[in-house]
Image (spheres, rainbow, N blue to C red):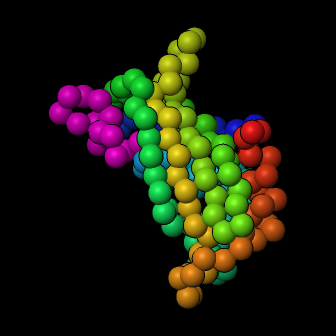
């Protein structure tokens, strides 16, 4: 299973060549990450996790393979899956497609490893059960 989020490619996302500037794909990944919390737990769920629970998910590793360009005006459809649900980290797998095409062109394929951190002490902590419950149906079968 995956979580899917769509966002338009904006003028601010493209470079002089008219295609999405490569770091903007990482921004799209994070938009999908935030929208996952909103869709499943409510509009302020991620904010409350950070501010009230003091639990964060800083990226400790990120990679992406760029497969095809996206242009201003395209709709980027981001699929989020969990590649690994570890003891103190989560590896998110993102695939970005150009929406509205019958063949679903894959434009970017990336992963972001996030540590689970107590923000008060900025140390890694075990993934809380409520986070496991939120993510376990997104774990990609091996």
Asked where in the image residue 22 lies, by quadrant, the reply is top left
Total marks in image:
0
> In the rendered structure, which segment of residues is drawn in magenta?
11-25
Residue 31 x/y as whole percent: 51, 50
Q: Image point 68% across, 51% down: which residue? A: 84
Q: Image point 56% across, 61% down: which residue? A: 114
Q: In the rendered image, which quarter contains the C terminus?
A: top right
Front residue of this view, candidates 122 and 78 = 122
Q: Residue furthest front?
A: 142
Is residue 124 among the parts visible in the rendering? yes
Q: In the rendered image, which quarter contains the N terminus?
A: top right
Q: Residue furthest left?
A: 16
Residue 45 x/y as whole percent: 67, 65
Front residue of this view, candidates 87 and 52 = 87
Residue 56 among magenta residues: no
Q: Does 21 sit left or right of 117 as displayed?
A: left
Dominant secondary structure of the residues highlighted in magenta in the image: loop
Is residue 5 among the parts visible in the rendering? no
Instruction: Decide: is 16 above or below 39.
Output: above
Residue 18 among magenta residues: yes
Q: Image point 55% across, 88% down: which residue? A: 121
Instruction: Decide: is 122 above or below 99.
Output: below
Q: Image point 77% across, 39% down: which residue? A: 141
Instruction: Decide: is 101 above or below 93.
Output: above
Residue 3 x/y as whole percent: 68, 41
Residue 88 x/y as whole percent: 66, 69
Q: Residue furthest bottom?
A: 121
């Amino acid at each position: 299973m995956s979580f899917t989020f769509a966002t338009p490619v904006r003028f601010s996302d493209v470079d002089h060549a008219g295609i999405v500037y490569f770091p903007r794909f990482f921004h799209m990944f994070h938009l999908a990450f935030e929208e996952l919390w909103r869709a499943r737990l409510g509009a302020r769920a991620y904010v409350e996790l950070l501010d009230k629970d003091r639990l964060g998910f800083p990226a400790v590793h990120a990679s992406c393979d760029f497969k095809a360009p996206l242009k201003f005006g395209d709709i980027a459809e981001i699929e989020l899956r969990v590649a690994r649900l570890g003891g103190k980290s989560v590896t998110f797998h993102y695939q970005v497609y150009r929406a509205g095409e019958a063949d679903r062109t894959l434009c970017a394929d990336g992963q972001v490893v996030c540590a689970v951190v107590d923000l008060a002490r900025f140390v890694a902590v075990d993934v809380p059960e409520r986070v496991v419950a939120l993510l376990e149906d997104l774990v990609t079968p091996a």
